[in-house]
Image (cartoon, rainbow, N blue to C red):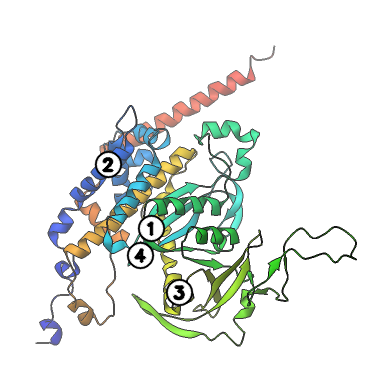
Amino acid sequence: MTKEANEPNIFDAQRWGLPAEAVADLADRLWRFWSRFRDCFKTKTRDTSENAYVYLHGMLTMETKRNFANIARRVIDPDHDGQSLQQFVSDSPWRGQAVFDQIQTEIVARPELSGGMLTVDESADECAGDQKAGAGRQYLGREGKVDMGQVGVGVGYYKDGVWTLVDAELYLPERWFDQDHAPLRKRWHIPEDRTFKTKPELALEMVKQAKRNQLPFEVVGCDSLYGRNIQFRADLDAEGLVYMADVPVGTQVYLNELIVGVPETPPSKKGRPFTGWRVLSDDKPLEVRSIVTGPDIVLQPLEIRHTERGVLTYECAARRVWTITESGQVREESLFIRREHDGSFSYSLSNAAVDVPLTQLALWRCWRYFAERIFQDAKSEGGWDELQARKYRSWIHHTALTALALWFVAETKLDWARAYPRDPELVRQLEVEVLPALSMANVCELLRAVLPLKQLSPAEATRLVVKHLVNRSHSTRSRLKAQRRNRGPPEI
């Protein structure tokens, strides 16, 4: 008998922490999960929470085409037109922020999630025109270009293989607050008290909200769009928050502490006296990309953590640098340098204490990866990018429900890991350092099995197609009538 024959079965679901009773309970788990949040969807006059369950069900079990009509047909009834779902997402006045606040409250109640990273990032989607809330020609990070689109700023939370979206806001370009856009602001439900705010300002507000909610993060991470904003970093520091902020290669820093002030005007010198601040010392700014070649930078190979692709290793270095805000405030920060696997370098600035070890800075920098995973899961598995939202309210509502789907998966992973621990012998038997974690796709696959969508019979599918054709014909008839009215009576 071979050695493999004597080994326990590696395909035994029990050993992977997936016992039959856990999978069978997944549908009821979703119902219990939704029940905790149902008060978030009640308005002064109506209880619309049942729609939230239907929408959540559809987001987690459908793989594509998660629009209102399709969700209603596959979850409720094949003849349902989805109008109630559309009204719930687009027009009902329930508060999306209530959903985000409760997600944060539930994270606070989980001790195992203490000490994570709050991540700031943005998500952009192209638009065909400028008739959607916040639409305009702007930089779309996802596409890497300036084009017509909507941009949302999101705040996520990560700790030990668990990630979720905890807040989000739709960015509204400054032109959306001029008089010409007043009709659109009203039509698309943009709050009357909303004023123009830059993306870093929106992000700072959400970070402060998370702090007020006592979210247990130890560091704030952000990409270079936010990290290059000196005031954003200074504002985080003023809040007593540690940050690890990516910065572009051209970011200027000083290698020595600066003397900044208003220069004295010599008595004999003509002209107006100096009024603005200047760097009074002889120090000159350097771009961060030039520092990596300096003699005082020694890159150290660090083993960050074990991953499914092996040990994650980077060459890293750090040194103290000084920067200046627009108001002339001198700030001391740590410049973190990392050699990427393609040979290029990335740079981050942090206000961490000088005694924070390089390994901790490197770990924080690697946690930034999970900010991207939050948005990837939200779009590829939750359908975040499948709603073509014209109204501000519909964008906020759809995003809050997407965050709810992410938190359901994250909570399921946490609870199953604690209640059904994996067999540690799998690591030895499979000859790996770490076992792969459950993905959102895995949880959704299991949920589809225990909470199947309604399948259409040939007769039902045919009836829906005919109904669709009739509706399109009615729409064409309406347009023809409008054209005839606009043309007026025929000339004689």
Q: Which residue is mark 4?
A: 115
Of labels 4 and 3, earlier in sequence is 4
Relative to residue 483, is residue 46 drawn left or right? left
| SS for dot 1 | helix
Q: Which numbered disc, 2 or 4, marks the residue closer to the eye?
A: 4
Residue type at tag 1: Asp
Q: Position of residue 120 (x, y in %)?
A: 47, 58
Of labels 1 and 2, earlier in sequence is 2
Residue type at tag 2: Val
| SS for dot 4 | loop
Residue type at tag 4: Gly
Relative to residue 102, is residue 318 drawn left or right? right
* 10 Å crowding of disc 1: few (<14), some (14-19), many (20+): many
- How far apart are labels 2 and 3 at the CA level? 46 Å
Mark seen at residue 75: 2
- How far apart are labels 2 and 4 at the CA level? 38 Å
Determine whether label 2 and label 3 are within 8 Å by CB.
no
Of labels 2 and 3, earlier in sequence is 2
